[in-house]
């Protein structure tokens, strides 16, 4: 004889999505899309709670998706970077990989590069259901705002790395103003007064922040930021080479150059060598990001260490330790450091200045 069941109770294998929908007072399509993490559905947290409560009461377990939707446990993190070829991002990946391993979490790294936008890559990762949370280290300011809205709407746990676009809900960032101040103060200490800089594109948030940091640091030192002495370029070797050519073509070339990204800095050094510019005899160069190769170049390169590895590691820790709906707006705990090497020194003497200016502009 069959055992009596409590009113309304049903065996798990007889419960349907439609019954869950009736119990939660929602359309059946909402239940289906929620369980599939379909990106086209937008529901309030209250609606989501009702659906999950109904699933629990009725004992409905179609597959792992319901359990995963309910759980806040992170088993896999996706990390989106702009370009695998740029050594700067390898530092971020290294830190995130180390922290993920320590937490027993899988890390999937994807590059937007040239063929796929950061937004498209984020959408693909969310739709694939391969990761439980996202770290996003790429994208323009406009893309960052759209990605933020997209992930908030879909209740996906995420964190931007070094992106502070207005309205961004969750971000961990570097103190770029402090970092560029270290480079400027270092060069001012040698006696430099004529500065130039190569910054990222103004469409990139880091480019704007580092440009503003330069202006602030020069103002603090009582020095001008001259028109034509600050050149925007993309974060690449070629970008640094092209930007250097523009700077060295000015009527009164600078004695100090700050480059706000490592690949650009190496490009600038190559362009200086090709132009017959002695570093640091004619021009002192300080570069962002302290990568190991800086100690093996000729000359060795003075750098500002931005704690990129810490950015990746602390990003993972925040994703795991903080509730997914908590606002995060904080800097990396480790401050930037200056690593003095051979590419910076005292300004050239007056005689050398006259010689290099004439040589650099076609004098006999």
Image (cartoon, grey):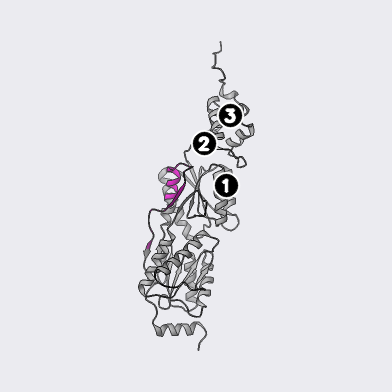
Q: CA distance from mark 3 to mark 2?
A: 19 Å
Tag in front: 2 or 1: 1
Q: Which region shows up in magenta?
A: 314-337
Secondary structure found at label 2: helix
Mark closest to the chain's N terminus, 2 or 1: 2
Vertical side of 62 occupied by 119: above or below? below
Residue 332 painted magenta: yes
Q: Residue at label 2? A: 68
Give the quarter of the image for residue 23: top right
271 is higher (above) or lower (below) than 149: below
Coordinates of residue 259 in the picture (x, y in percent): 46, 67
Q: Which mark is residue 24?
A: 3
**Residue at x 39% of width, y 65% of height:** 182
**Is 44 on the left or on the right of 289, as rendered?**
right
Instruction: Decide whether residue 166 is among the magenta residues.
Output: no
Instruction: Give the residue number, with chain letter if any, for mark 1.
Output: 150
Q: Residue furthest bottom?
A: 364
Quarter containing the N terminus: top right
Q: CA distance from mark 2 to mark 1?
A: 20 Å
Pointer 3 or 1: first along the chain: 3
Q: Is residue 325 left or right of residue 350?
A: right
Task: Kindly report which numbered mark, 3 or 2, lies closer to the viewer in this rendering.
Answer: 3
Q: Secondary structure at mark 1?
A: helix
Question: Which mark sits nearer the N-terminus, 3 or 2?
Answer: 3
Q: How many marks?
A: 3
Near-viewer residue (139 or 50): 50
Q: Which mark is residue 164?
A: none
Image spot of residue 35 (x, y percent): 58, 35
């Amino acid at each position: 004889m069959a055992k009596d069941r409590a009113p309304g109770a049903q065996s798990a294998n007889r419960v349907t999505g439609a019954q869950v929908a009736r119990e939660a007072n929602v359309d059946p399509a909402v239940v289906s899309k929620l369980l599939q993490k379909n990106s086209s559905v937008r529901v309030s947290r209250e609606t989501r709670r009702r659906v999950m409560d109904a699933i629990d009461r009725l004992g409905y377990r179609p597959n792992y998706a319901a359990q995963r939707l309910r759980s806040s446990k992170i088993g896999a993190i996706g990390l989106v970077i702009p370009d695998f070829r740029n050594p700067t991002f390898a530092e971020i990946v290294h830190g995130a990989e180390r922290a993920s391993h320590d937490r027993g979490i899988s890390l999937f790294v994807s590059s937007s590069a040239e063929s796929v936008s950061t937004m498209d890559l984020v959408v693909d990762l969310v739709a694939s259901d391969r990761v439980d949370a996202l770290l996003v280290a790429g994208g323009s300011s406009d893309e960052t705002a759209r990605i933020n809205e997209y992930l908030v709407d879909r209740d996906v746990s995420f964190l931007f790395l070094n992106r502070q676009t207005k309205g961004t809900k969750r971000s961990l960032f570097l103190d770029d103003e402090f970092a560029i101040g270290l480079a400027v103060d270092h060069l001012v200490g040698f006696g430099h007064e004529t500065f130039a800089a190569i910054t990222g594109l103004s469409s990139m948030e880091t480019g704007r922040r580092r440009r503003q940091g330069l202006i602030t640091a020069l103002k603090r030192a009582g020095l001008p930021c001259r028109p034509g002495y600050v050149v925007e370029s993309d974060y690449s070797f070629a970008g640094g080479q092209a930007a250097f050519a523009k700077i060295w073509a000015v009527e009164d070339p600078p004695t100090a150059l700050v480059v706000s990204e490592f690949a650009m800095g190496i490009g600038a050094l190559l362009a200086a060598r090709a132009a017959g510019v002695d570093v640091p005899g004619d021009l002192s160069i300080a570069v962002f990001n302290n990568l190991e190769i800086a100690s093996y170049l000729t000359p060795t390169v003075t750098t500002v260490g931005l704690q990129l590895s810490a950015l990746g590691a602390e990003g993972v820790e925040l994703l795991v330790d903080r509730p997914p709906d908590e606002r995060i707006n904080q800097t990396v705990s480790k401050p930037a450091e200056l690593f003095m090497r051979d590419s910076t020194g005292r300004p050239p003497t007056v005689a050398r200045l006259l010689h290099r200016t004439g040589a650099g502009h076609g004098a006999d």
